[in-house]
Amino acid sequence: SIYIKPIPIDMTEQDLLSLCTDLGCHGVESINLMRRSNRPRGYAFVQFSTVEDAQDAIEKLEEYGKFKAGPARYSGEHKNYLSRYCEMSDPENTNIYIANLDID
């Protein structure tokens, strides 16, 4: 996966896929525009079928000049949350924890 920023507020997943295709990027498997409360956060993650396709896309997006792109990594906050959660887990507990569900 790679991250791409800044993503314009009005850009859709289809727009980003079209841009990647126009730039000659191959192997796009999925696109996830990050949102909070249904508003764009200004960046996206794009999954490619191979590492080579992802590296090629990073170069092409950087050359295009309107975006910054790079390999996707877990943030330190996410890693800390996961490690804290794993430390609290009880292997004999059958409950599951689900977060960030939309409530109507």
Image (tube, rainbow, N blue to C red):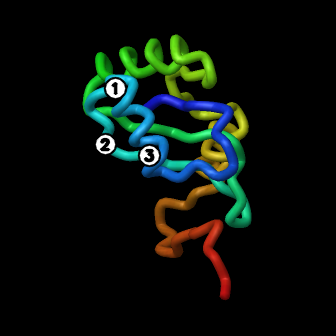
Q: Quadrant of residue 102?
A: bottom right
Are circles 2 and 3 on residues that touch, CB within 8 Å?
A: no
| Image: 63 above or below 82 | above
Q: Which sits in the foreground, 43 or 102? A: 43
Dot 3 amino acid type: Ile
Dot 2 amino acid type: Glu
Q: x%, y% of residue 55?
A: 39, 16
Q: Is residue 30 left or right of residue 97?
A: left
Q: Which residue is mark 1?
A: 25
Question: Which of the marked residues, 1 or 3, is nearer the chain's N terminus?
Answer: 1
Q: Quadrant of the N terminus?
A: top left
Q: Is residue 93 left or right of residue 87?
A: left
Of badges 1 and 3, the one in the foreground is 1
Q: Secondary structure at mark 1?
A: loop
**Crowd around label 3: few <14 · some 14–19 · many ≥20 (10 Å):** some
Q: Point out which mark residue 29 bears.
A: 2
Q: Secondary structure at mark 2?
A: strand
Q: x%, y% of residue 38?
A: 68, 65
Q: Point out which mark residue 31 bears.
A: 3
Q: CA distance from mark 2 to mark 3?
A: 7 Å
